[in-house]
């Protein structure tokens, strides 16, 4: 009798599961109170930028990266100056270590970044090359880097920060030498090098509807109409409580949704003028929550990545004078209200 009931139950479950093997339906991992557990089932991946020096030296940091996130982005170690310090001489060691760490922990990797005006090696920017040479160097770099990681990168930030805030093309070594069409070329090259990776545009101050996001909208539309493999629109999400937050993020994300591209928040932090106080800390939680809600309200928003999760290693104090406290965990890895807001917001949505 007991066996009969179990058999009947199994028959029903198998019918529901179709012909999928049992291993395709592992029992859900328990909620250990982490962001990663809260994000599971929401349809949105939760990621962090990873500082490789911290990952190597700080066991608590390392454990938190594994526990709290299902997606990682190298904060620096896939940038041109790190991977190709001399022409044609590559150093993948740090980036490979992150990719291996991610695989061991069941995490996806966002590759960052292929074409940018910043953190390029001096040999590249010293003005020693003709446009034709620069184009060949760029093409080779993209094939070599994307090829090296082929099959191991979920999404690439292909072109980073290519517009000014007023929506005009940023003047860079690439735009100057190659004209605006280089953007289409780099997406085509990256796609050839790894056809399965999702290819993103990425920028800051493009979260709401404004001149910059309008420029990205027009560019995305034009590139896709021309068959260029652009599959994603990344919004970095570097906010500051002293500036207030963009009000029309949902509208912006949804218009890219409708273009058929995926969207992602890729580098979120919410900084403040130091020292923190209760009002700033509460505003910060709202900033983190606002971007997460916008992502969860859009069909094709695939990931929400913080640019560091602890103030112990955040880039903010080193780059913005007098500012800091920009991440969801403090310098002792203790959660702030922003952390709780993220967890609670994720838990609202199952999709
Ligand atoms: C930053 C890193 O966090 C710093 O460690 C580094 O010194 C400079 O770059 N936009 C981006 C990121 O796309 O790559 C930048 O990361 C932050 C702004």
Image (cartoon, rainbow, N blue to C red):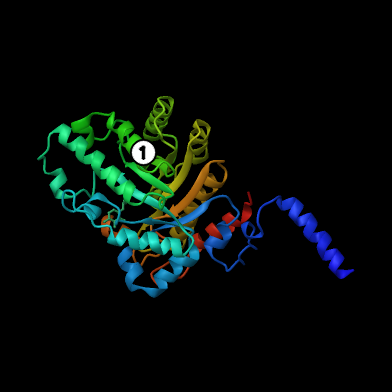
Q: Quadrant of the N terminus?
A: bottom right
- How many marks do you count on the picture? 1
Please tell me which residue lies in front, 127 or 162: 127
Identify which residue is drawn at 37% across, 30% down: 215
Q: Position of residue 190 (x, y in %)?
A: 34, 40
Give residue 208's quadrant in the image. Answer: top left
Q: Position of residue 290 (x, y in %)?
A: 51, 49
Q: Give left or right: position of 76 versus 217.
A: left
Q: Few, some or many C-alpha atoms within 10 Å of disc 1 (few <14, some 14-19, many ≥20)?
A: some
Q: Secondary structure at mark 1?
A: helix
Residue 173 visible in the snapshot: no
Q: Position of residue 105 (x, y in %)?
A: 47, 64
Identify which residue is drawn at 45% across, 68% down: 64
Disc 1: residue Cβ within 8 A of ligand 1's nearest atom: no
Residue 207 against residue 177 in the figure, above or below: below
Residue 192 against residue 67 in the figure, above or below: above
What residue is shown with label 1? 192
Residue 228 visible in the snapshot: yes
């Amino acid at each position: 009798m007991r066996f009969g009931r179990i058999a009947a139950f199994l028959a029903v479950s198998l019918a529901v599961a179709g012909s999928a093997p049992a291993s395709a339906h592992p029992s859900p991992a328990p909620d250990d109170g982490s962001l990663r557990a809260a994000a599971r089932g929401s349809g949105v991946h939760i990621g962090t930028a990873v500082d490789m020096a911290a990952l190597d030296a700080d066991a608590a940091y390392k454990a938190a990266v594994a526990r709290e996130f299902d997606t990682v982005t190298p904060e620096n170690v896939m940038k041109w100056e790190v991977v190709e310090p001399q022409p044609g001489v590559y150093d993948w060691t740090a980036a490979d270590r992150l990719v291996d760490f991610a695989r061991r922990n069941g995490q996806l990797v966002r590759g960052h970044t292929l074409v940018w005006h910043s953190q390029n090696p001096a040999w590249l920017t010293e003005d020693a090359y003709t446009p034709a040479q620069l184009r060949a160097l760029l093409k080779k770099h993209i094939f070599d880097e994307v090829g090296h990681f082929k099959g191991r990168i979920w999404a690439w930030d292909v072109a980073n920060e290519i517009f000014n805030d007023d929506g005009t093309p940023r003047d860079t070594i690439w735009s100057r030498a190659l004209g605006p069409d280089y953007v289409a070329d780099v997406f085509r090259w990256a796609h050839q090098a790894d056809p399965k990776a999702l290819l993103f545009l990425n920028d800051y101050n493009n979260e709401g509807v404004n001149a910059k996001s309008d420029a990205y909208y027009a560019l995305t539309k034009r590139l896709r109409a021309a068959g260029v493999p652009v599959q994603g629109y990344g919004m970095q999400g570097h906010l500051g409580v002293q500036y207030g937050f963009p009000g029309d993020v949902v509208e912006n994300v949804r218009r890219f949704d409708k273009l058929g591209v995926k969207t992602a928040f890729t580098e979120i932090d919410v900084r403040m003028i130091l020292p923190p106080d209760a009002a700033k800390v509460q505003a910060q939680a709202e900033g983190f929550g606002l971007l997460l809600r916008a992502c969860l309200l859009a069909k094709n928003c695939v990931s929400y990545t913080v640019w560091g999760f602890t103030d112990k290693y955040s880039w903010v104090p080193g780059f913005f004078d007098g500012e800091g406290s920009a991440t969801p965990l403090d310098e002792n890895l203790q959660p702030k209200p922003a952390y709780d807001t993220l967890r609670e917001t994720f838990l609202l949505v199952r999709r």
